[in-house]
Image (cartoon, grey):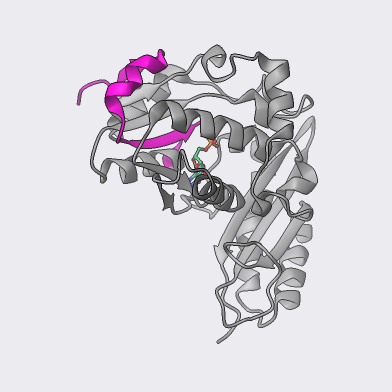
Amino acid sequence: MTEPRIIQNPVELEALAGGCFVPTMGALHEGHLSLIREAARHQGPVITSIFVNPTQFAPNEDFDAYPRSLDRDVRLAGEAGTDVVYLPAESSLYPEGRAASRTTAAGLPIPNVAKHPQLEDAGRPHFFGGVCLVVARLLEQVRPSATVFGEKDWQQLQVIRAMIADDAKLDDIEVIPGPIVRESDGLAMSSRNAYIPPADRLRARGLSLALDAAEKATTPDEAETLMRATLEAHQLTVEYAVIRDPESLMPVTDLNRPTRAIITAGLDFEGGSVRLLDNRAMPLVR
Ligand code: AMP
């Protein structure tokens, strides 16, 4: 196994155009590594980026505390099949500077699927502007033929698909979804799971158990009630627990079309809290 090449200067990426790109914020776990393995099944070099993106964090969020483990990440990314680890300098992605880049992100035209008032936008209104800005700039630098995004962040996957489809400079890039990788107890892997104190860890199972509970429902209302009850029984603070169309994320009217359960809930613990996300295909017609 050769070590992956590390690139910091985007000019060096030009020779790698046409590869398969996996953007990450580092603190890599099996979820990220599964996306890299998926990328390695496609033709061309695998480029994994590691960049903790300031524009997707609100000032009161965990940008400074976000886990960083670069040496380990580079080794794991290489073992999973990464040819090149791209470590962009903030000044190359945001030459306008951090404060101005936040303003750019806030004013960016983002796809409608990002704007549902009951989903991510409710708790994190800055988030998709920052994600769209950084992903568009990374894609313009890396120029891949394909890019892999995890289904764990289901709304983000739909937003990225829509953003790429709507942008004539990017619309030849294939978006490949990667299935959710879970801990043995069902908790979806996340770099932020490291924040959960061991004493509170059992409560985090509430999300996957809420999805299990919804499997018994035959209507969206019933599924949403069952999910909320399970989340609350685990002392989780429900942000949303809904049944939606998997692509538009609109409320469901036709139960014969595919439907998806999508959950975000807060786990508060002594001295902090963590937002946990999960989702699952949830057909209600049997
Ligand atoms: P992040 O580093 O959290 O920005 O995530 C980078 C990519 O990894 C995104 O496409 C995520 O959706 C994906 N990802 C994170 N956790 C998981 C997981 N448990 N299973 C699959 N993909 C994941």
- The quadrant in which the N terminus is found is top left
Q: Is residue 252 magenta?
A: no
Residue 206 visible in rendering: no
Q: Which residues are magenta?
A: 1-30
* Rendered view: 45 above or below 174: above
Instruction: Kindly give the residue lying farthest to the bottom in the view shown.
Output: 286
Q: Position of residue 237 (x, y in %)?
A: 80, 51
Residue depicted at x 65% and y 32%: 130
Left or right of residue 231: residue 27: left
Q: Position of residue 238 (x, y in %)?
A: 78, 54
Residue 283 picture quarter? bottom right
Q: Position of residue 119 (x, y in %)?
A: 73, 53
Looking at the picture, tell me which residue is in the foreground, 264 or 125. Answer: 125
Instruction: Kindly give the residue lying farthest to the front in the view shown.
Output: 168
Residue depicted at x 48% and y 29%: 138
Residue 151 visible in rendering: yes
Q: Position of residue 81 (x, y in %)?
A: 28, 34
Residue depicted at x 35% and y 39%: 36
Number of marks in the rendered image = 0
* Rendered view: 218 above or below 186: below
Q: Is residue 12 magenta?
A: yes
Residue depicted at x 67% and y 27%: 55
- The quadrant in which the C terminus is found is bottom right
Looking at the picture, tell me which residue is in the foreground, 11 or 210. Answer: 11
* Rendered view: 283 above or below 127: below
Looking at the picture, tell me which residue is in the foreground, 260 or 265. Answer: 260
Instruction: Kindly give the residue lying farthest to the left in the view shown.
Output: 1
Left or right of residue 112: residue 258: left
